[in-house]
Amino acid sequence: MAAWESRVDQLLYEGEEVRRQVGGESVGVVVTSHRVLAFTPEAKGPNFRAVDRPNVTDVGRRTAGETRWLVNGVKWLVIGVFLLAGGALFDFEGFLGDVDVSQGTGRIGLGGILGLFSLMRTVFALMDDAFLLGGAIAAVGGLAALGWYLQTRRTDITIAVAGEDDIHLPKEGLTDDDIEAIAAAVEPP
């Protein structure tokens, strides 16, 4: 805002007066008798926005992040927990009982059936490990996605505007007192 700090009077209408002016590292807000002027030269979107004061409905903080990372993180974490619990609680190999397949394979007609039974026992034993491994991978992936969501979270100052897009200002450099001063200055006299 340093570039416009000394030139705000050039943006004012005739008869318009500055009521409150606050500025941070990368943001500046000027509340006049008629409008709210927001300067955000380092943020995405326009560098300057002016809104008539009657259209300003609220001023406050808003915390937001990439919600898709939150949704995916929770989903994969839940899947991971269920797979880990399934692998730990259920003994899939035990479903087949204690049948000894090593004896009796020489009997007529039993070799194929006992071979299939042995294969199923091996598959069920691998299912335990697959559930545990899959659950661990899903849980780690879910925790990583939740960590990325927390990394993308940011707190913005939001000036709610009726009938238009809200003005989002980065919080850097603005104190809580500045935010309260802006909110008080936009209230009708």
Image: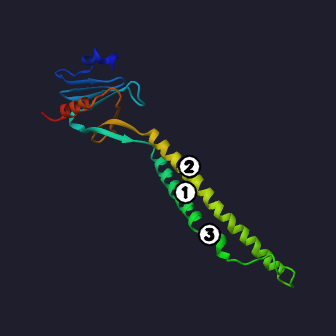
Mark 2 vs mark 3, foreground winner is 3
Residues marked 2 and 3 touching at CB (< 8 Å) = no
Of mark 2 and mark 3, the one earlier in the sequence is 3
Depth check: give the residue in front, 80 or 87.
87
Residue tagged 2? 141
Depth check: give the residue in front, 58 or 85.
85
The answer to whether residue 80 is above or below residue 182 is below
Residue tagged 3? 91
Q: Please provide percent x and percent y for residue 126.
A: 69, 64
Q: Please provide percent x and percent y for residue 149.
A: 46, 43
In the image: residue 4, left or right of residue 95: left
Depth check: give the residue in front, 188 or 181.
181
Residue drawn at x 36%, y 41% is 63
The answer to whether residue 43 is above or below residue 100 is above
Q: Quadrant of the N terminus?
A: top left
Disc 3 element: loop
Disc 2 element: helix
Q: How is the image coloured?
A: rainbow
In the image: residue 103, left or right of residue 42: right
Residues marked 1 and 2 touching at CB (< 8 Å) = yes
Residue drawn at x 87%, y 81% is 106
Of mark 1 and mark 2, the one earlier in the sequence is 1
Q: Gap in Å between the C-alphas at discs 3 and 1?
A: 18 Å
Residue tagged 1? 80
The amino acid beneath tag 1 is: Gly
